[in-house]
Amino acid sequence: MQPGCFNFAGMESLSADVKNILGLQLPSDPRWVNLAELQLDEILTDHAYCEQKAATTCISLITKNSEKELLVEELAPIVTEEWGHFRMVIAELKKRNLKLGRQRKDVYVNSLLQFQKKDGSPQERFLDQMLIMALIEARSCERFKRLSEGLDDAYMRNFYRRFMESEAGHYTLFITLAEHYLDKKVVRKRWAEWLKYEKELMKEMEIRGDRIH
């Protein structure tokens, strides 16, 4: 199997079976796009750090699971892609005469980590690591889609459409890899639990225009 074979550019190539398990249970509040448009400099800074963390997390997954050949082959190109995204956002900041600024506390991701099984078996911990990445990528994809459709600036709509198309493949990849190494029914059951938890989390979180999540 060639590296990158699960890295879909969009949703068209996914089976209906895969699509049916990926749906987020609560869409972002439509007001978020309006708030984000007022603080695009802050959104770009937060976005840059999201891409940086995605790249470094994939590196960590590779080093911790180096015996999983398919995982290594599939995540290695994702590291390159995510770091490329980081550089793209940095370039956009520079074009606007803005600096990167400091990394912010990610309330969304920290809240997701609280649901992760830390005392489970190695298989359970691996599964949650893969699914939390899938969920972060899924929500990022949904947020980028809203920016690509809701921003007044046509250039920025196109800018975020490119990120949306990329993330659509990433969150599918993490679930596909989990199902490669673990029982499919176990993966689906835990994914449903993650989706339910994330729905309640989104209900409780403050709507902030200075954060991607």
Image (spheres, rainbow, N blue to C red):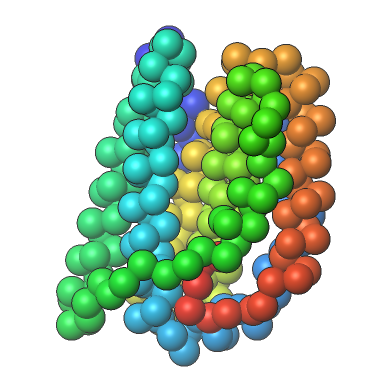
Q: Residue 175 at what x, y percent from top left? A: 62, 30
Q: Residue 141 at what x, y percent from top left? A: 55, 54
Answer with the quarter of the image where residue 178 lies: top right
Between 106 and 195, the residue placed more toward the observer is 106
Q: Is residue 97 visible?
A: yes
Above or below for 105 versus 206:
above
Q: Is residue 172 visible?
A: no
Q: Quadrant of the C terminus?
A: bottom right
Q: Residue at x 70, y 46 (%)?
A: 115
Task: Report whether 36 appears left or right of 102.
Answer: right
Answer with the quarter of the image where residue 39 lies: bottom left
Q: Residue 112 at what x, y percent from top left? A: 64, 52
Q: Residue at x 42, y 24 (%)?
A: 64
Q: Residue at x 36, y 60 (%)?
A: 49
Task: Report whether 149 appears left or right of 61.
Answer: right
Q: Residue at x 57, y 50 (%)?
A: 136
Above or below for 28 versus 187:
below
Between 12 and 89, the residue placed more toward the observer is 89
Between 95 and 205, the residue placed more toward the observer is 205
Above or below for 138 versus 210:
above
Q: How many marks?
A: 0
**Residue lying farthest to the front in this orientation:** 119
Q: Residue 189 at what x, y percent from top left? A: 81, 30
Q: Quadrant of the N terminus?
A: top left
